Image: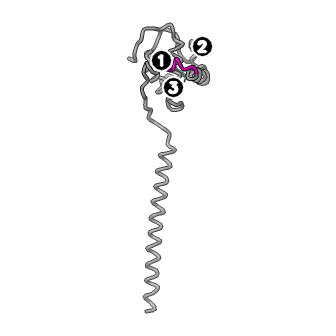
Amino acid sequence: MITSAPNKKGHTISFWKLFLILVGTLSVFGGMIIFFIIVTPKTTLTVTTITDKEIKELQGNSAALENGYIQYQLRCARCHGEKLDGGLEGPSLIDTEWIYGNTAQSIFKVITVGIPSKGMPAWGKQLQVEDIKALTAVIIDLNTKNTAKTDTP
Ligand code: HEC
């Protein structure tokens, strides 16, 4: 009678200990997985689409154009020049020569994914889609010299 009681008690405690260890371990791993999902930076870039209609709308929206122009001066001017006419590192964006095409979609895409091998950053990792759309509209708006549309090869 006396000897069986501690055994029973011991058994109960070890069950709950095990249970707590199990729950603890699972929540630690669960927490780590959630943490990594949140913290891990985006490695793949999703390129959405921009239509000519959207560009037209943006060109009529002075607040959007102004935002695009501010973004341009902040992030692009150091390579492509303050007037978009090219600089030491980046080509002119207002001439008639386009390496990657001058349709709204090809400009939007090149800004989003960049050209890492040439030093053009992938802005889709840092900017909101709306900002990239505004930048595309600004480039198209200021590029009055080029009327022939060529797409990305
Ligand atoms: C660190 C320098 C650098 C910065 C900053 C930069 N670019 Fe570029 N960009 C380049 C280079 C270099 C190329 C040309 C790549 C090549 O020759 O293949 C390029 C190419 C481009 C093209 C394609 C031009 C064509 O002829 O097809 C566009 C459009 C463009 N950049 C837009 C932007 C915009 C918008 C920003 C700011 C959000 C920006 N770039 C910031 C370096 C830069």
The three-letter amino acid code for the residue at tag 2 is: Lys
Front in this rendered view, residue 151 or 64: 64
Could you say where residue 89 lies in the image, as x and y percent from the top left? 56, 18
Give whichever of discs 3 and 2 has the lower sequence position: 2
The three-letter amino acid code for the residue at tag 1 is: Lys
For residue 100, which quarter of the picture? top left
Q: Answer yes or no: do the residues labelled 3 and 2 have beta carbons within 8 Å?
A: no
* Residue highlighted by disc 3: 132
Give whichever of discs 2 and 1 has the lower sequence position: 1
| Label 3 within 8 A of ligand 1 by Cβ | yes
* Residue highlighted by disc 1: 56
Can residue 27 be seen in this snapshot? Answer: yes
Which residue sits at x=46%, y=56%?
29
Q: Is residue 43 left or right of residue 88?
A: left
Which residue sits at x=51%, y=20%?
58
Main secondary structure of the magenta stretch: helix
The three-letter amino acid code for the residue at tag 3 is: Ile
Quadrant the N terminus occupies: bottom left
Could you say where residue 38 lies in the image, as x and y percent from the top left? 50, 45
**Name of the residue lying farthest toward the left:** 153
What is the crowding at mark 3: few (fewer than 14 residues within 10 Å), some, or many (at least 20)? many
Whether residue 56 is in magenta: the answer is yes
Front in this rendered view, residue 72 or 79: 72
Which residues make up the magenta segment? 55-62
